[in-house]
Amino acid sequence: MPVTTSAATTSTAPLAVRGICKRFGATQALADVSLDFHPGEIHAILGENGAGKSTLMHILAGIHRADTGSVLLDGRPAFFSTPRDARNAGVGMVHQHFALVEALSVAENLALVLPRRSRWRFDRAATAAEADALAQRIGIALGRPDAPVSQLPVGARQRIEILKALAHARRVLILDEPTAVLTPQEVRPLFAMLRQLRNEGRLILFITHKLREVRELADRVTVMRRGRMVGTYPTADLSEREMAERMIGEVVAGRPHATASARGAVALAVSALAVDDARRGRVLADVNVSVRAGEILGIAGVDGNGQQELFDVLVGLRRPSRGTVQVREHTLSTFTPRAALAAGIGHIPPDRQHEGLVLPMSLEENLLLSRVLLDRCSRHGLLDIAAARRFAAAAVSRHGIRADLGDAARSLSGGNQQRVLVARALAQEPAVLVAANPSRGLDFAATRAVADALLDSASRGCAVLLISTDLDEVLDLSSRVSVISNGRLSPPLEPPFDPERLGLLMAGTAS
Protein backbone atom coordinates (compact mmCIF):
# COMPACT_ATOMS: atom_id res chain seq x y z
CA MET A 1 0.00 0.00 0.00
CA PRO A 2 1.49 3.42 -0.89
CA VAL A 3 1.97 6.19 1.61
CA THR A 4 -1.18 8.27 2.03
CA THR A 5 -1.71 11.55 3.85
CA SER A 6 -4.68 13.48 5.09
CA ALA A 7 -5.28 17.17 4.80
CA ALA A 8 -5.20 17.87 8.51
CA THR A 9 -2.07 19.60 9.67
CA THR A 10 -1.23 18.64 13.23
CA SER A 11 2.50 19.36 13.54
CA THR A 12 5.00 21.79 12.07
CA ALA A 13 7.91 19.32 12.41
CA PRO A 14 8.83 17.51 9.16
CA LEU A 15 8.66 14.20 11.06
CA ALA A 16 6.69 13.61 14.25
CA VAL A 17 4.77 10.96 16.15
CA ARG A 18 1.64 11.64 18.16
CA GLY A 19 0.09 9.38 20.80
CA ILE A 20 1.73 6.22 19.52
CA CYS A 21 0.69 3.04 21.34
CA LYS A 22 1.74 -0.49 20.48
CA ARG A 23 1.06 -3.76 22.27
CA PHE A 24 2.47 -7.24 21.61
CA GLY A 25 0.21 -9.67 23.43
CA ALA A 26 0.32 -8.78 27.11
CA THR A 27 3.33 -6.49 26.66
CA GLN A 28 2.74 -2.75 26.28
CA ALA A 29 5.71 -1.89 24.06
CA LEU A 30 4.78 1.79 23.55
CA ALA A 31 2.38 3.95 25.54
CA ASP A 32 1.28 7.38 24.29
CA VAL A 33 4.62 8.41 22.72
CA SER A 34 4.69 11.87 21.13
CA LEU A 35 7.88 13.35 19.72
CA ASP A 36 9.09 15.84 17.11
CA PHE A 37 12.18 15.29 14.92
CA HIS A 38 13.97 17.88 12.81
CA PRO A 39 15.99 17.67 9.60
CA GLY A 40 19.70 18.37 9.84
CA GLU A 41 20.07 16.82 13.30
CA ILE A 42 21.41 13.64 14.84
CA HIS A 43 18.87 12.52 17.40
CA ALA A 44 19.85 9.71 19.80
CA ILE A 45 17.22 7.39 21.27
CA LEU A 46 18.28 5.95 24.63
CA GLY A 47 16.72 3.32 26.85
CA GLU A 48 17.21 -0.11 28.29
CA ASN A 49 16.42 -3.24 26.28
CA GLY A 50 12.64 -3.42 26.15
CA ALA A 51 12.18 0.35 26.59
CA GLY A 52 10.43 0.61 23.20
CA LYS A 53 13.20 2.24 21.16
CA SER A 54 13.32 -0.32 18.36
CA THR A 55 9.53 -0.68 18.29
CA LEU A 56 9.16 3.07 17.75
CA MET A 57 11.78 3.03 14.99
CA HIS A 58 10.12 0.00 13.38
CA ILE A 59 6.87 1.94 13.22
CA LEU A 60 8.68 4.82 11.51
CA ALA A 61 10.28 2.34 9.09
CA GLY A 62 6.99 0.62 8.19
CA ILE A 63 7.84 -2.71 9.85
CA HIS A 64 5.13 -2.40 12.51
CA ARG A 65 1.91 -0.42 12.54
CA ALA A 66 0.85 1.48 15.64
CA ASP A 67 -2.31 0.32 17.40
CA THR A 68 -3.26 3.95 17.98
CA GLY A 69 -1.64 7.28 17.24
CA SER A 70 -0.07 8.60 14.06
CA VAL A 71 3.16 9.27 12.22
CA LEU A 72 3.29 12.75 10.70
CA LEU A 73 5.24 13.81 7.62
CA ASP A 74 5.26 17.55 7.03
CA GLY A 75 2.38 17.84 9.47
CA ARG A 76 0.14 15.29 7.75
CA PRO A 77 -0.60 11.74 8.97
CA ALA A 78 1.31 9.16 6.93
CA PHE A 79 0.46 5.46 6.85
CA PHE A 80 3.33 3.04 6.27
CA SER A 81 1.95 -0.45 5.71
CA THR A 82 5.28 -1.88 4.58
CA PRO A 83 8.97 -0.93 4.68
CA ARG A 84 8.66 -0.11 0.97
CA ASP A 85 6.09 2.57 1.83
CA ALA A 86 8.55 4.10 4.31
CA ARG A 87 11.41 3.91 1.81
CA ASN A 88 9.27 5.61 -0.84
CA ALA A 89 8.72 8.42 1.69
CA GLY A 90 12.49 8.73 2.19
CA VAL A 91 12.88 6.74 5.42
CA GLY A 92 15.59 4.06 5.55
CA MET A 93 16.67 1.86 8.45
CA VAL A 94 19.81 -0.10 9.30
CA HIS A 95 18.90 -2.92 11.69
CA GLN A 96 20.96 -4.27 14.56
CA HIS A 97 20.51 -7.79 13.19
CA PHE A 98 21.41 -7.62 9.53
CA ALA A 99 18.90 -8.37 6.78
CA LEU A 100 21.35 -9.58 4.14
CA VAL A 101 21.01 -12.63 1.88
CA GLU A 102 24.24 -14.43 2.70
CA ALA A 103 24.14 -16.67 -0.37
CA LEU A 104 24.28 -13.60 -2.64
CA SER A 105 27.18 -11.31 -3.42
CA VAL A 106 27.59 -7.73 -2.25
CA ALA A 107 26.37 -6.37 -5.59
CA GLU A 108 23.40 -8.74 -5.66
CA ASN A 109 22.32 -7.70 -2.17
CA LEU A 110 22.51 -4.05 -3.17
CA ALA A 111 20.58 -4.77 -6.36
CA LEU A 112 17.61 -5.75 -4.19
CA VAL A 113 17.18 -2.12 -3.13
CA LEU A 114 18.83 -0.03 -5.85
CA PRO A 115 16.58 1.29 -8.64
CA ARG A 116 16.16 -1.34 -11.34
CA ARG A 117 17.11 -0.59 -14.92
CA SER A 118 15.41 -3.72 -16.24
CA ARG A 119 12.81 -6.11 -14.91
CA TRP A 120 14.32 -8.99 -16.88
CA ARG A 121 18.09 -8.63 -16.63
CA PHE A 122 20.44 -8.06 -13.71
CA ASP A 123 23.25 -5.77 -14.86
CA ARG A 124 26.03 -6.77 -12.46
CA ALA A 125 28.54 -4.18 -13.70
CA ALA A 126 26.07 -1.29 -13.60
CA THR A 127 24.87 -2.24 -10.11
CA ALA A 128 28.45 -2.50 -8.84
CA ALA A 129 29.32 0.89 -10.35
CA GLU A 130 26.24 2.54 -8.84
CA ALA A 131 26.94 1.03 -5.43
CA ASP A 132 30.59 2.05 -5.59
CA ALA A 133 29.68 5.63 -6.51
CA LEU A 134 27.28 5.85 -3.55
CA ALA A 135 29.91 4.35 -1.25
CA GLN A 136 32.59 6.81 -2.36
CA ARG A 137 30.26 9.78 -1.96
CA ILE A 138 29.62 9.00 1.69
CA GLY A 139 33.06 7.64 2.49
CA ILE A 140 32.35 3.91 2.90
CA ALA A 141 34.85 1.25 1.81
CA LEU A 142 32.68 -1.16 -0.16
CA GLY A 143 35.27 -3.80 -1.02
CA ARG A 144 34.80 -6.34 -3.80
CA PRO A 145 31.24 -6.22 -5.19
CA ASP A 146 31.45 -9.90 -6.24
CA ALA A 147 32.39 -11.13 -2.74
CA PRO A 148 29.80 -13.46 -1.16
CA VAL A 149 28.25 -11.81 1.90
CA SER A 150 28.64 -15.05 3.86
CA GLN A 151 32.42 -14.66 3.71
CA LEU A 152 32.55 -11.05 4.92
CA PRO A 153 33.42 -9.94 8.47
CA VAL A 154 30.74 -8.26 10.54
CA GLY A 155 32.05 -4.73 9.97
CA ALA A 156 31.86 -5.14 6.19
CA ARG A 157 28.28 -6.42 6.45
CA GLN A 158 27.39 -3.32 8.46
CA ARG A 159 28.68 -1.08 5.68
CA ILE A 160 26.54 -2.89 3.12
CA GLU A 161 23.46 -2.42 5.30
CA ILE A 162 24.17 1.31 5.54
CA LEU A 163 24.51 1.54 1.77
CA LYS A 164 21.20 -0.29 1.32
CA ALA A 165 19.43 2.16 3.62
CA LEU A 166 21.02 5.22 2.04
CA ALA A 167 19.81 4.16 -1.38
CA HIS A 168 16.37 5.39 -0.26
CA ALA A 169 16.90 7.46 2.91
CA ARG A 170 16.74 10.87 1.29
CA ARG A 171 15.05 12.32 4.40
CA VAL A 172 15.51 10.03 7.40
CA LEU A 173 18.19 7.45 8.23
CA ILE A 174 17.51 5.22 11.24
CA LEU A 175 20.38 3.25 12.74
CA ASP A 176 19.79 0.61 15.42
CA GLU A 177 23.00 0.07 17.41
CA PRO A 178 25.23 0.86 14.39
CA THR A 179 28.51 0.62 16.30
CA ALA A 180 27.71 -2.61 18.15
CA VAL A 181 29.73 -4.55 15.55
CA LEU A 182 32.35 -1.89 14.74
CA THR A 183 35.76 -1.19 16.19
CA PRO A 184 37.15 2.29 17.02
CA GLN A 185 38.85 2.44 13.62
CA GLU A 186 35.51 1.89 11.89
CA VAL A 187 33.48 4.11 14.21
CA ARG A 188 35.37 7.30 13.32
CA PRO A 189 34.58 7.21 9.57
CA LEU A 190 31.00 6.19 10.36
CA PHE A 191 30.55 9.23 12.59
CA ALA A 192 32.14 11.45 9.95
CA MET A 193 29.70 10.07 7.40
CA LEU A 194 26.71 10.67 9.69
CA ARG A 195 27.80 14.27 10.32
CA GLN A 196 28.08 14.78 6.57
CA LEU A 197 24.58 13.41 6.05
CA ARG A 198 23.31 15.72 8.80
CA ASN A 199 24.95 18.69 7.10
CA GLU A 200 23.15 17.71 3.90
CA GLY A 201 19.85 18.08 5.75
CA ARG A 202 19.02 14.47 6.63
CA LEU A 203 17.58 13.50 9.97
CA ILE A 204 19.66 10.78 11.64
CA LEU A 205 17.89 8.71 14.29
CA PHE A 206 20.49 6.85 16.28
CA ILE A 207 19.68 4.05 18.75
CA THR A 208 22.63 3.25 20.97
CA HIS A 209 23.54 2.09 24.45
CA LYS A 210 26.97 3.74 24.38
CA LEU A 211 26.63 6.97 26.31
CA ARG A 212 30.01 8.29 25.20
CA GLU A 213 28.85 8.07 21.60
CA VAL A 214 25.71 10.03 22.40
CA ARG A 215 27.80 12.79 23.96
CA GLU A 216 30.14 12.81 20.97
CA LEU A 217 27.66 12.61 18.13
CA ALA A 218 24.06 13.55 18.98
CA ASP A 219 22.51 17.02 18.93
CA ARG A 220 19.50 15.91 21.02
CA VAL A 221 18.70 12.80 23.00
CA THR A 222 15.35 11.22 23.83
CA VAL A 223 15.24 8.85 26.81
CA MET A 224 12.61 6.09 26.99
CA ARG A 225 11.72 3.74 29.82
CA ARG A 226 9.24 0.85 29.72
CA GLY A 227 7.55 2.08 26.57
CA ARG A 228 7.11 5.67 27.72
CA MET A 229 8.90 8.94 27.09
CA VAL A 230 11.08 10.18 29.93
CA GLY A 231 12.09 13.33 28.08
CA THR A 232 14.00 14.94 25.22
CA TYR A 233 17.10 17.01 26.02
CA PRO A 234 19.92 18.87 24.29
CA THR A 235 22.79 16.43 24.59
CA ALA A 236 25.08 19.06 26.04
CA ASP A 237 22.73 19.42 29.03
CA LEU A 238 23.20 15.83 30.28
CA SER A 239 26.24 14.02 31.63
CA GLU A 240 26.67 10.29 30.94
CA ARG A 241 25.61 9.49 34.48
CA GLU A 242 22.48 11.65 34.18
CA MET A 243 21.57 9.84 30.96
CA ALA A 244 21.99 6.47 32.69
CA GLU A 245 19.91 7.53 35.67
CA ARG A 246 17.06 8.66 33.43
CA MET A 247 17.22 5.37 31.53
CA ILE A 248 16.98 3.06 34.54
CA GLY A 249 15.20 5.37 36.98
CA GLU A 250 17.74 5.11 39.77
CA VAL A 251 21.13 6.48 40.81
CA VAL A 252 23.83 4.47 39.06
CA ALA A 253 27.21 3.40 40.31
CA GLY A 254 30.42 4.12 38.46
CA ARG A 255 31.69 1.93 35.64
CA PRO A 256 33.11 -1.44 36.71
CA HIS A 257 36.85 -1.96 36.50
CA ALA A 258 39.07 -4.97 36.80
CA THR A 259 40.47 -5.61 40.24
CA ALA A 260 44.17 -5.87 40.89
CA SER A 261 43.89 -9.11 42.90
CA ALA A 262 46.81 -11.52 42.87
CA ARG A 263 46.72 -14.06 40.05
CA GLY A 264 46.78 -17.78 40.62
CA ALA A 265 48.29 -20.64 38.65
CA VAL A 266 48.07 -20.77 34.87
CA ALA A 267 44.63 -22.15 33.97
CA LEU A 268 44.77 -21.76 30.17
CA ALA A 269 47.94 -22.11 28.11
CA VAL A 270 47.85 -21.87 24.33
CA SER A 271 51.14 -22.52 22.55
CA ALA A 272 52.15 -21.95 18.90
CA LEU A 273 48.53 -22.17 17.75
CA ALA A 274 47.88 -21.94 14.01
CA VAL A 275 44.69 -22.26 11.97
CA ASP A 276 44.52 -22.60 8.19
CA ASP A 277 41.45 -21.83 6.11
CA ALA A 278 40.92 -23.40 2.70
CA ARG A 279 39.95 -20.07 1.15
CA ARG A 280 41.91 -17.49 3.10
CA GLY A 281 45.05 -19.39 3.99
CA ARG A 282 46.56 -19.01 7.46
CA VAL A 283 44.16 -17.05 9.66
CA LEU A 284 45.93 -17.65 12.99
CA ALA A 285 49.70 -17.78 13.20
CA ASP A 286 51.85 -18.77 16.18
CA VAL A 287 49.37 -17.59 18.81
CA ASN A 288 50.50 -17.90 22.43
CA VAL A 289 48.11 -17.18 25.32
CA SER A 290 48.50 -17.64 29.05
CA VAL A 291 45.63 -16.84 31.42
CA ARG A 292 45.93 -17.30 35.15
CA ALA A 293 43.16 -18.20 37.56
CA GLY A 294 41.52 -15.06 38.89
CA GLU A 295 42.43 -12.72 36.02
CA ILE A 296 40.69 -11.36 32.94
CA LEU A 297 42.94 -11.29 29.89
CA GLY A 298 41.44 -9.05 27.22
CA ILE A 299 42.02 -9.54 23.51
CA ALA A 300 41.26 -6.42 21.49
CA GLY A 301 41.21 -6.18 17.73
CA VAL A 302 39.43 -5.14 14.57
CA ASP A 303 36.74 -7.64 13.64
CA GLY A 304 37.89 -10.33 11.21
CA ASN A 305 41.49 -10.64 12.41
CA GLY A 306 41.23 -14.17 13.79
CA GLN A 307 39.00 -13.69 16.84
CA GLN A 308 36.33 -16.07 15.59
CA GLU A 309 38.87 -18.78 14.75
CA LEU A 310 40.54 -18.49 18.17
CA PHE A 311 37.15 -18.74 19.88
CA ASP A 312 36.20 -21.75 17.74
CA VAL A 313 39.39 -23.63 18.62
CA LEU A 314 39.10 -22.98 22.34
CA VAL A 315 35.47 -24.14 22.58
CA GLY A 316 36.01 -27.17 20.36
CA LEU A 317 34.32 -26.05 17.16
CA ARG A 318 37.49 -26.18 15.06
CA ARG A 319 40.66 -28.23 15.10
CA PRO A 320 43.88 -26.17 14.87
CA SER A 321 46.42 -26.84 12.15
CA ARG A 322 49.07 -27.06 14.84
CA GLY A 323 49.74 -25.98 18.38
CA THR A 324 48.45 -27.05 21.78
CA VAL A 325 45.72 -25.98 24.20
CA GLN A 326 46.20 -26.86 27.85
CA VAL A 327 43.64 -26.38 30.64
CA ARG A 328 45.36 -26.65 34.00
CA GLU A 329 47.32 -29.92 33.68
CA HIS A 330 45.25 -31.34 30.83
CA THR A 331 46.27 -30.99 27.18
CA LEU A 332 43.35 -31.20 24.74
CA SER A 333 43.76 -34.03 22.26
CA THR A 334 40.25 -33.83 20.85
CA PHE A 335 38.68 -30.57 19.70
CA THR A 336 34.95 -30.97 20.20
CA PRO A 337 32.53 -28.96 22.33
CA ARG A 338 32.12 -31.92 24.68
CA ALA A 339 35.90 -32.28 25.11
CA ALA A 340 36.32 -28.56 25.77
CA LEU A 341 33.54 -28.59 28.35
CA ALA A 342 34.92 -31.72 30.02
CA ALA A 343 38.31 -30.01 30.28
CA GLY A 344 36.71 -27.08 32.12
CA ILE A 345 36.22 -24.50 29.34
CA GLY A 346 32.96 -22.57 29.42
CA HIS A 347 32.02 -19.98 26.87
CA ILE A 348 29.79 -17.05 25.96
CA PRO A 349 29.39 -17.10 22.15
CA PRO A 350 29.58 -13.93 20.03
CA ASP A 351 26.12 -14.34 18.44
CA ARG A 352 23.49 -15.07 21.08
CA GLN A 353 20.68 -15.76 18.63
CA HIS A 354 22.49 -18.10 16.24
CA GLU A 355 25.15 -19.71 18.44
CA GLY A 356 23.89 -19.43 21.99
CA LEU A 357 20.14 -20.00 22.17
CA VAL A 358 17.47 -22.23 20.66
CA LEU A 359 14.96 -19.47 20.13
CA PRO A 360 11.72 -21.54 20.02
CA MET A 361 12.64 -23.27 23.29
CA SER A 362 11.75 -21.83 26.68
CA LEU A 363 13.98 -19.83 28.97
CA GLU A 364 14.17 -22.80 31.35
CA GLU A 365 15.13 -25.23 28.56
CA ASN A 366 17.84 -22.90 27.26
CA LEU A 367 19.34 -22.58 30.74
CA LEU A 368 19.70 -26.36 30.83
CA LEU A 369 21.40 -26.72 27.43
CA SER A 370 24.61 -28.10 28.92
CA ARG A 371 25.65 -31.64 29.67
CA VAL A 372 27.09 -30.51 33.01
CA LEU A 373 23.85 -28.86 34.09
CA LEU A 374 21.62 -31.64 32.78
CA ASP A 375 23.66 -34.18 34.76
CA ARG A 376 23.41 -32.00 37.83
CA CYS A 377 19.62 -31.90 37.54
CA SER A 378 19.19 -35.61 36.78
CA ARG A 379 18.74 -38.73 38.88
CA HIS A 380 19.57 -42.18 37.56
CA GLY A 381 19.83 -40.80 34.05
CA LEU A 382 16.42 -39.10 34.10
CA LEU A 383 15.85 -35.36 34.35
CA ASP A 384 14.51 -34.33 37.74
CA ILE A 385 11.91 -31.77 36.70
CA ALA A 386 11.68 -30.22 40.18
CA ALA A 387 15.47 -29.90 40.47
CA ALA A 388 15.66 -28.37 36.98
CA ARG A 389 12.95 -25.88 37.87
CA ARG A 390 14.75 -24.91 41.11
CA PHE A 391 18.03 -24.45 39.23
CA ALA A 392 16.43 -22.32 36.50
CA ALA A 393 14.51 -20.17 39.01
CA ALA A 394 17.69 -19.56 41.02
CA ALA A 395 19.61 -18.57 37.86
CA VAL A 396 16.85 -16.17 36.81
CA SER A 397 16.89 -14.55 40.25
CA ARG A 398 20.69 -14.40 40.55
CA HIS A 399 21.23 -12.78 37.15
CA GLY A 400 18.18 -10.49 37.11
CA ILE A 401 16.56 -12.09 34.06
CA ARG A 402 13.23 -10.36 33.53
CA ALA A 403 11.11 -13.14 32.10
CA ASP A 404 9.10 -16.19 33.10
CA LEU A 405 10.66 -19.64 32.90
CA GLY A 406 8.16 -20.72 30.25
CA ASP A 407 8.76 -17.75 27.94
CA ALA A 408 10.27 -18.61 24.55
CA ALA A 409 13.85 -17.38 24.18
CA ARG A 410 12.87 -15.47 21.05
CA SER A 411 10.47 -13.33 23.10
CA LEU A 412 13.20 -12.10 25.45
CA SER A 413 14.94 -8.75 24.95
CA GLY A 414 18.56 -8.82 23.83
CA GLY A 415 19.75 -8.03 27.34
CA ASN A 416 17.76 -10.88 28.87
CA GLN A 417 18.93 -13.28 26.18
CA GLN A 418 22.52 -12.40 26.99
CA ARG A 419 21.94 -12.83 30.71
CA VAL A 420 20.68 -16.35 29.99
CA LEU A 421 23.96 -17.17 28.25
CA VAL A 422 26.00 -15.71 31.10
CA ALA A 423 23.92 -17.54 33.70
CA ARG A 424 24.32 -20.86 31.89
CA ALA A 425 28.06 -20.45 31.38
CA LEU A 426 28.81 -19.46 34.97
CA ALA A 427 26.54 -22.13 36.45
CA GLN A 428 28.89 -24.73 34.97
CA GLU A 429 31.65 -23.33 37.22
CA PRO A 430 34.30 -23.52 34.50
CA ALA A 431 38.01 -23.26 35.17
CA VAL A 432 38.28 -21.11 32.03
CA LEU A 433 35.61 -18.84 30.57
CA VAL A 434 35.98 -17.67 26.97
CA ALA A 435 33.68 -14.68 26.44
CA ALA A 436 33.33 -13.25 22.91
CA ASN A 437 31.78 -9.78 22.67
CA PRO A 438 29.65 -10.48 25.75
CA SER A 439 27.99 -7.05 25.86
CA ARG A 440 27.44 -6.48 22.14
CA GLY A 441 24.16 -4.65 21.58
CA LEU A 442 23.26 -4.46 25.28
CA ASP A 443 21.87 -1.53 27.21
CA PHE A 444 23.56 0.16 30.15
CA ALA A 445 22.07 -2.05 32.85
CA ALA A 446 22.61 -5.31 30.95
CA THR A 447 26.19 -4.34 30.09
CA ARG A 448 26.87 -3.58 33.73
CA ALA A 449 25.32 -6.90 34.77
CA VAL A 450 27.50 -8.86 32.34
CA ALA A 451 30.61 -6.96 33.47
CA ASP A 452 29.81 -7.60 37.12
CA ALA A 453 29.31 -11.30 36.38
CA LEU A 454 32.69 -11.59 34.63
CA LEU A 455 34.47 -9.73 37.43
CA ASP A 456 32.76 -11.88 40.05
CA SER A 457 33.70 -15.05 38.19
CA ALA A 458 37.35 -13.97 38.07
CA SER A 459 37.27 -13.06 41.76
CA ARG A 460 36.23 -16.64 42.51
CA GLY A 461 39.22 -18.07 40.64
CA CYS A 462 37.98 -18.46 37.07
CA ALA A 463 40.43 -17.57 34.29
CA VAL A 464 38.53 -15.30 31.89
CA LEU A 465 39.60 -14.75 28.29
CA LEU A 466 37.66 -11.73 27.03
CA ILE A 467 37.65 -11.43 23.22
CA SER A 468 35.98 -8.15 22.28
CA THR A 469 35.93 -5.58 19.51
CA ASP A 470 34.70 -3.00 22.06
CA LEU A 471 37.90 -1.36 23.27
CA ASP A 472 36.15 0.32 26.20
CA GLU A 473 34.93 -3.07 27.41
CA VAL A 474 38.42 -4.54 27.17
CA LEU A 475 40.03 -1.63 29.00
CA ASP A 476 37.40 -1.57 31.75
CA LEU A 477 37.50 -5.26 32.58
CA SER A 478 40.93 -6.62 31.75
CA SER A 479 43.86 -7.25 34.05
CA ARG A 480 46.11 -7.46 30.98
CA VAL A 481 45.45 -6.78 27.28
CA SER A 482 46.75 -8.34 24.07
CA VAL A 483 45.89 -7.21 20.55
CA ILE A 484 45.11 -9.53 17.65
CA SER A 485 45.92 -8.29 14.15
CA ASN A 486 46.18 -10.32 10.93
CA GLY A 487 45.95 -13.52 12.94
CA ARG A 488 48.85 -12.69 15.23
CA LEU A 489 48.64 -11.86 18.91
CA SER A 490 50.77 -9.22 20.59
CA PRO A 491 52.47 -9.89 23.93
CA PRO A 492 50.16 -8.86 26.79
CA LEU A 493 50.30 -5.25 27.97
CA GLU A 494 50.15 -4.39 31.65
CA PRO A 495 48.12 -1.45 33.05
CA PRO A 496 48.03 1.49 32.78
CA PHE A 497 46.99 0.92 29.18
CA ASP A 498 47.83 3.42 26.46
CA PRO A 499 44.78 3.62 24.14
CA GLU A 500 46.88 5.25 21.42
CA ARG A 501 49.35 2.35 21.38
CA LEU A 502 46.48 -0.13 21.46
CA GLY A 503 44.92 1.62 18.48
CA LEU A 504 48.17 1.38 16.52
CA LEU A 505 48.47 -2.31 17.37
CA MET A 506 44.89 -2.90 16.26
CA ALA A 507 45.62 -1.14 12.97
CA GLY A 508 48.72 -3.30 12.49
CA THR A 509 51.06 -0.29 12.42
CA ALA A 510 52.94 -0.92 15.68
CA SER A 511 55.01 -3.80 16.98
Image (cartoon, grey):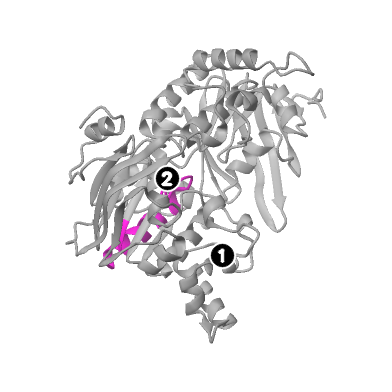
On the image, numbered disc 2 is attached to which residue?
Answer: 308
Rendered position, 326 above or below 152: below
- Image x and y of residue 455, in percent: 31, 59
Q: CA distance from mark 1 to mark 2?
A: 23 Å
Label 2 amino acid? Gln
Find disc 1 in the rendering and name its residue.
Answer: 366
Residue 188 seen by the camera: yes
Q: Is residue 255 magenta?
A: no
Q: Which mark is residue 163?
A: none
Question: Viewer-proximal residue, 339 or 35?
Answer: 339
Is disc 2 surrounded by few (<14), some (14 to 19) or many (20+) residues within 10 Å? some
Residue 15 picture quarter:
top right
Which residues, given as a range, are shown in magenta? 436-464
In the rendered structure, which amino acid carries the disc numbered 1? Asn
* Residue 418 rendering spot, x and y as whole percentages: 49, 55
Residue 452: image location, x then y, percent: 35, 58
